[in-house]
Image (cartoon, helix red, strand yellow):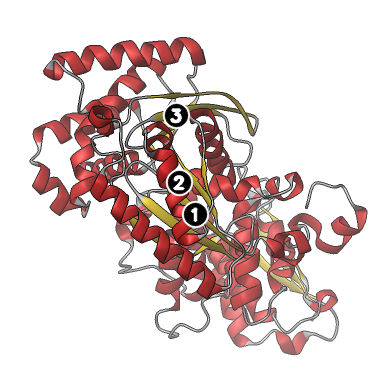
């Protein structure tokens, strides 16, 4: 629901709310281009789709290195300036070819601190017509934190965004951005710190202790934003042998961070690059960024650490949303959009949700959001070859650009959708990913998937003719109540699928009523 409390909305859509992408304000945001001119990279992103959980229609990055040498010269790197200008000309040309509204472009630490930053900004406008907004450190921190809110509505904790020349901190509490500040702890700038390893250690301790004094206690979640943090997370995945190569919402403990920093120090840089696929320019910044992270974690002692692929660019999109759109659930909006775009019978997911929900009332607090998401996605992969649909939908949901769910929840949805198309998961190529779920979670995902598989047999039914499921776990009884006159819809294939669902539930008595 959109948070307005509108009774008609509730009556029309129940727990799903009215789809965001049918709202005129959301459609206005359906394709938005933003440009981020940073100290390391220059990137253009065009967001497309349901505005609350956008897809990346276009995403291109040039590692221009504008901030390289800034601490020594006070000026933008000459080669980086040329590369950045070339990239911006291309981006503006692409935006015009796509018919986009004017690009929203911001520049951060390198351009705001360089003596020739204003000249570069003027040159960009003269050469491309692109207005480059140079933002200060606190505004950069605010936008990065808003990017986190795009993926985690109601998030709490400390957002840390590291770039080449600076590092920003912002406090999140109950979905609002609080205290924020900027520091000069970007890895490019740290290259100039004198005194070797000992000098760097002392510098980081002093600077981060001062940051902690200003920010106050921040022992909740630490959200990591920025390419150098993502690179460290990728290395952490490699060290652990982690099976799911999705960085967004990847979690690390303090202990894991310390172990990975030791791993970086003890492993040849070229070997790490080969193992992780990191670029040379990014890998060159990792050792210094790792030292920053070590001192940051040691000082703030967060209870857990989460990687956010959403940052300043997503924060610029979030900035344009009215609050009622911000309050929507990004997972459900993305799934609802996928159903509308790709399902054979858009809208059936809501009916399917109502049909399978009785199986899960009181089942240990199974998140209804995941049930909704599975129902909405239950048939969006129907175009895949029938022999591989179960694999395609598992692979897509576990790797999709979806916010608002953890890695284990991705796998839960994947298992449920796998069983939507296949009765068993023997000899599955995804066995290593199954290890992210407990045995209980696997069983619940299987039950949900087999309920979807059976419910999909009744797709042709109108709302009042679909029938109902009733489950009595204490009595060990599952009932299917058919509406009079619908017996022909319940054929032998449907019966076999209902029996499979009953078997997944365990030792239950099955009763079919209303034949």
- Residue 278 locus on image (x, y percent): 22, 51
Q: Nearer the viewer, residue 8 or 314?
A: 314
- Left or right for 96, reference 52: left
Residue 158 seen: no
In this view, the residue farthest toward the right is 7
- Residue 473 locus on image (x, y percent): 66, 52
Asked if the residue at tag 1 contacts the one at tag 2, i.e. Cβ–Cβ closer than 8 Å, the answer is: yes
Q: Name the residue under label 3.
A: 168
Write the residue at 47% across / 58% down: 45
- Residue 374 locus on image (x, y percent): 58, 62
* As drawn, 396 above or below 403: below
Asked if the residue at tag 2 contacts the one at tag 3, i.e. Cβ–Cβ closer than 8 Å, the answer is: no
- Left or right for 298, reference 280: right
- Residue 263 locus on image (x, y percent): 16, 34
Where residue 125 is drawn, which disc sits there? 1
Dot placed on the residue nearer the N-terminal end, 1 or 3 = 1
Q: Mark 2 points at which residue?
A: 121
Q: Distance between the residues labelled 1 and 3?
A: 27 Å
Q: How crowded is mark 3: few (under 14 residues within 10 Å), some or many (20 or more)?
A: many
Q: Quadrant of residue 454?
A: bottom right
Say how many tags the image has: 3
Q: Nearer the viewer, mark 3 or mark 2?
A: 2
* As drawn, 409 above or below 381: above
Q: Is mark 1 on a helix, strand or loop?
A: helix
């Amino acid at each position: 629901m959109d948070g307005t409390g509108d009774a008609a909305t509730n009556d029309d859509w129940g727990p799903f709310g009215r789809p965001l992408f049918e709202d005129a304000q959301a459609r206005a945001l359906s394709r938005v281009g933003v440009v981020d001119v940073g100290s390391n990279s220059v990137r253009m992103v065009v967001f497309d789709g349901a505005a609350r959980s956008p897809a990346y229609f276009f995403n291109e990055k040039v590692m221009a290195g504008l901030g390289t040498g800034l601490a020594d010269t006070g000026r933008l790197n000459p080669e980086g300036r040329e590369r950045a200008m070339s990239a911006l000309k291309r981006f503006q040309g692409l935006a015009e070819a796509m018919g986009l509204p004017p690009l929203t472009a911001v520049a951060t630490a390198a351009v705001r601190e360089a003596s020739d930053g204003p000249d570069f900004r003027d040159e960009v406008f003269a050469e491309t017509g692109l207005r480059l907004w140079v933002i200060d450190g606190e505004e950069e921190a605010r936008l990065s934190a808003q990017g986190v809110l795009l993926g985690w509505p109601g998030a709490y904790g400390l957002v840390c965004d590291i770039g080449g020349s600076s590092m920003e901190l912002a406090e999140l509490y109950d979905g609002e951005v609080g205290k924020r500040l900027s520091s000069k702890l970007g890895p490019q700038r740290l290259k100039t710190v004198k005194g070797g390893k000992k000098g760097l250690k002392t510098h980081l301790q002093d600077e981060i202790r001062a940051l902690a004094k200003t920010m106050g206690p921040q022992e909740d979640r630490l959200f990591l934003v920025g390419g150098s943090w993502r690179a460290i997370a990728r290395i952490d995945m490699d060290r652990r042998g982690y099976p799911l190569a999705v960085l967004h919402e990847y979690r690390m403990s303090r202990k894991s961070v310390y172990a990975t920093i030791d791993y970086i120090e003890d492993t040849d840089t070229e070997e790490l690059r080969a193992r992780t696929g990191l670029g040379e320019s990014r890998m060159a910044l990792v050792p210094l960024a790792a030292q920053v992270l070590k001192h940051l974690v040691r000082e703030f002692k967060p209870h857990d650490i989460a990687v956010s692929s959403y940052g300043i660019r997503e924060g610029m999109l979030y900035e344009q949303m009215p609050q009622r759109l911000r309050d929507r659930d990004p997972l459900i909006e993305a799934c609802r959009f996928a159903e509308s775009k790709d399902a054979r019978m858009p809208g059936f997911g809501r009916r399917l949700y109502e049909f399978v929900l009785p199986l899960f009332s009181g089942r240990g607090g199974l998140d209804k959001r995941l049930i909704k998401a599975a129902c909405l996605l239950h048939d969006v992969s129907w175009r895949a070859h029938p022999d591989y649909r179960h694999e395609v939908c598992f692979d897509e949901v576990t790797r999709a650009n979806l916010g608002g769910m953890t890695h284990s929840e991705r796998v839960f949805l994947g298992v449920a959708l796998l069983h939507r198309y296949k009765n068993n998961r023997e000899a599955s190529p995804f066995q290593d990913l199954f290890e992210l779920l407990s045995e209980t979670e696997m069983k619940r995902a299987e039950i949900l998937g087999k309920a979807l598989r059976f419910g999909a047999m009744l797709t042709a039914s109108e709302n009042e003719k679909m029938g109902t499921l009733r489950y009595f776990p204490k009595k060990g009884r599952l009932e299917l109540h058919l509406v009079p006159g619908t017996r022909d819809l319940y054929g032998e294939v449907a019966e076999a699928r209902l029996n499979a669902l009953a078997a997944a539930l365990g030792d239950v008595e099955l009763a079919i009523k209303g034949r």
